[in-house]
């Protein structure tokens, strides 16, 4: 299970991107809540991924 935790940031980022793509494809962009939640997943996913990479690095 520990080997999959380091990819959780990427998974969150990909989920946010997929949400944005699907949202624009089906015109669900009338609500800012949907866009902000997808953007939050992308940002926190990127930050989490960088943090986990730095944490397991030897430098």
Image (spheres, rainbow, N blue to C red):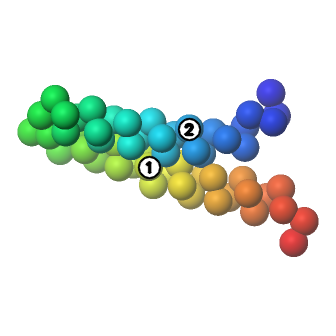
In the picture as drawn, the residue positioned furthest to the right comes out as 58
Task: Estimate the x, y position of residue 26 in percent, counting from the top left.
Answer: 16, 29
| Location of residue 28 by image quarter | top left
Residue ID at (72%, 53%)? 52
Q: Quadrant of the C terminus?
A: bottom right
Residue ID at (9%, 39%)? 30
Q: Which residue is mark 1?
A: 42
**Is 22 displayed left or right of 44 in the figure?**
left
**Is 52 displayed left or right of 48 in the figure?**
right
Task: Estimate the x, y position of residue 55 in percent, counting from the top left.
Answer: 79, 58
**Is 12 displayed left or right of 35 in the figure?**
right
Q: Which residue is mark 2?
A: 11
Residue ID at (58%, 45%)? 10
For marks 2 and 1, the one nearer the N-term is 2
| Location of residue 58 by image quarter | bottom right
Residue ID at (25%, 44%)? 35
Answer whether residue 37 is visible to the viewer in this image.
no
Alpha-carbon span between mark 2 and mark 1: 9 Å
Circle 1: element type = helix
| Location of residue 57 by image quarter | bottom right
Task: Estimate the x, y position of residue 43 in percent, counting from the top left.
Answer: 45, 54
Q: Pointer 1: residues within 10 angstroms few (<14), some, or many (20+)?
A: many
Answer whether residue 54 is visible to the viewer in this image.
yes
Q: Looking at the picture, does residue 54 appear above or below residue 27?
A: below
């Amino acid at each position: 299970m520990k080997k999959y935790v380091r990819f959780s940031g990427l998974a969150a980022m990909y989920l946010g991107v997929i949400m944005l793509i699907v949202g624009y494809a089906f015109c669900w962009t009338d609500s800012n809540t949907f866009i902000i939640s997808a953007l939050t997943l992308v940002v926190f996913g990127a930050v989490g991924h960088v943090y986990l990479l730095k944490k397991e690095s030897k430098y």
